[in-house]
Image (spheres, coloured by chain):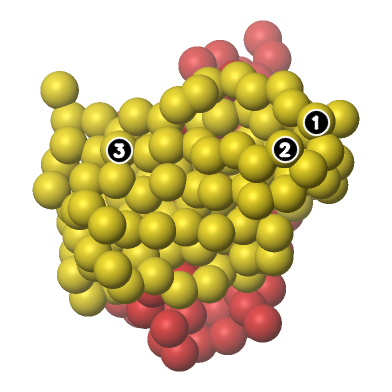
Amino acid sequence: EAQVTQNPRYLITVTGKKLTVTCSQNMNHEYMSWYRQDPGLGLRQIYYSMNVEVTDKGDVPEGYKVSRKEKRNFPLILESPSPNQTSLYFCASSFSRTGVDEQYFGPGTRLTVT
Amino acid sequence: ELKVEQNPLFLSMQEGKNYTIYCNYSTTSDRLYWYRQDPGKSLESLFVLLSNGAVKQEGRLMASLDTKARLSTLHITAAVHDLSATYFCAVVPLSNDYKLSFGAGTTVTVRA
């Protein structure tokens, strides 16, 4: 089944404790992206990747890191999480290698930082 | 910075009636997407609009794009309960093909 998977689905952590949210897609998509969803703000793009080893900042990259060492995986790293990073996070992928295309979204990861 | 505004943000619909959701954006673009999100779920793609004048229809939903007015509309015909969800538009600016900016979403509730 074609899908985007994220792990973990739920995470409660404390301020400053490094964490990684994994994202994997099995559709051989070139483009992958991370978003955070907050009430009243819609989704905001954190980082995106056009291809292996090629990443760039979205609108809200502060406090996050990403890497794209393999085509299928695009982990999101929070080196020192803070309470303002409490949010619902979505990973998404799309086929096109020439820009954003129709996106397939993962199930989401709900992160709480205390 | 690209701004995407949806209105209304909340829409209470009566079954059987017609409604429109508006999506305005602040910069040049010729690519716009509509997504649906059910409560507690992920997003699923509804429509891909790739040029001025594009119109797509699926069941009771119809989306259109006017790039000159920087406006997309999502029209709902004869609302039914299973259309209750949050609808998002998302825009790709011409200045950067790889960025995507979402509106705040329109939460739709359909009542009998």
Please indicate, yes or no, whether residue B108 appears anywhere in the rendered image.
no
Q: Is residue B112 above or below residue A5?
A: above
Return the residue at label 2.
Answer: A17
* Label 2 crowd (10 A; few <14 / some 14-19 / many >=20): few
N-terminal of the pair, mark 3 or mark 1, is 1
Residue sitting nearer the eye, B9 or A23: A23
Left or right: residue A64 versus residue B36 is right
> Residue A28's x, y, as percent?
13, 48
Q: What residue is rendered at 68% in x and 73% in y?
A: B3
> Residue B37's x, y, as percent?
53, 32
Q: What residue is rendered at 63% in x and 78% in y?
A: B2
Are the two marked residues, 1 and 2, in contact with CB atoms closer than 8 angstroms?
A: yes
Query: In the rendered structure, which amino acid carries the disc numbered 1?
Result: Val
In three-dimensional space, the C-alpha distance between marks 3 and 1, rounded to whole angstroms, equals 25 Å
* Parent chain of label 3: A
> Residue A58's x, y, as percent?
55, 69
Q: Residue A4's image quarter? A: top left
Please indicate, yes or no, whether residue B5 appears anywhere in the rendered image.
yes
* Parent chain of label 2: A
Mark toward the viewer: 3 or 1: 1
Numbered circles on residues, count: 3
* On-image quarter of the N terminus of chain A: top left
Question: Tag 2's secondary structure?
Answer: loop
Q: What residue is rendered at 62% in x and 57% in y?
A: A64
Chain letter for the part of the structure drawn in red: B
Return the residue at label 3.
Answer: A24
Q: Is residue A75 above or below residue B24?
A: above
Chain letter for the part of the structure drawn in yellow: A
Query: In the rendered structure, which amino acid carries the disc numbered 3?
Result: Ser
Return the residue at label 1.
Answer: A14
* On-image quarter of the C terminus of chain A: top right
